């Protein structure tokens, strides 16, 4: 078990449903921003699963001044 559970929870990937709870815009805006290159590019974990690197999202949010 990790020594720091909070740090461990900040690693890995998150799916769109979890991501949308943290962002102040709609899913359509998310995908427009991904396409424009102004938001973190997602990773395909499998043919049906797309996710975002949690650390990359937190870094983007910090740069934008978005609260977690």
Image: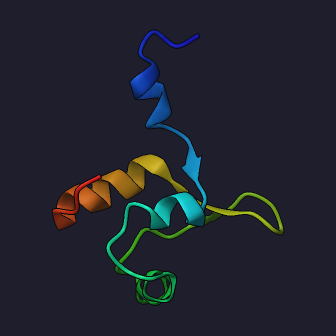
Q: Position of residue 57 (x, y in %)?
A: 39, 57
Q: Residue furthest left?
A: 65
Coloring basis for residues: rainbow
Residue 39 placement, left or right of 64? right
Q: Position of residue 31 (x, y in %)?
A: 51, 84
Q: Residue at x 58, y 64 (%)?
A: 17
How many numbered discs, if any? 0
Q: Position of residue 24 (x, y in %)?
A: 32, 73
Q: Residue at x 43, y 87 (%)?
A: 29
Q: Is residue 43 above or below residue 14?
A: below
The quadrant of the image that shows the N terminus is top right
Q: Residue furthest right?
A: 47
Q: Residue at x 21, y 56 (%)?
A: 62
Of the pair 23 and 52, the residue shown nearer to us: 23
Q: Is residue 46 above or below residue 68?
A: below
Q: Residue furthest front?
A: 21
Q: Position of residue 47 (x, y in %)?
A: 83, 68
């Amino acid at each position: 078990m990790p020594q720091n559970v909070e740090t461990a929870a900040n690693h890995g990937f998150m799916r769109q449903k979890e991501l949308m709870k943290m962002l102040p815009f709609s899913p359509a805006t998310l995908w427009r921003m991904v396409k424009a290159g102004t938001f973190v590019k997602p990773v395909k974990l499998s043919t049906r699963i797309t996710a975002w690197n949690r650390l990359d999202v937190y870094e983007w949010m910090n740069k934008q001044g978005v609260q977690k």
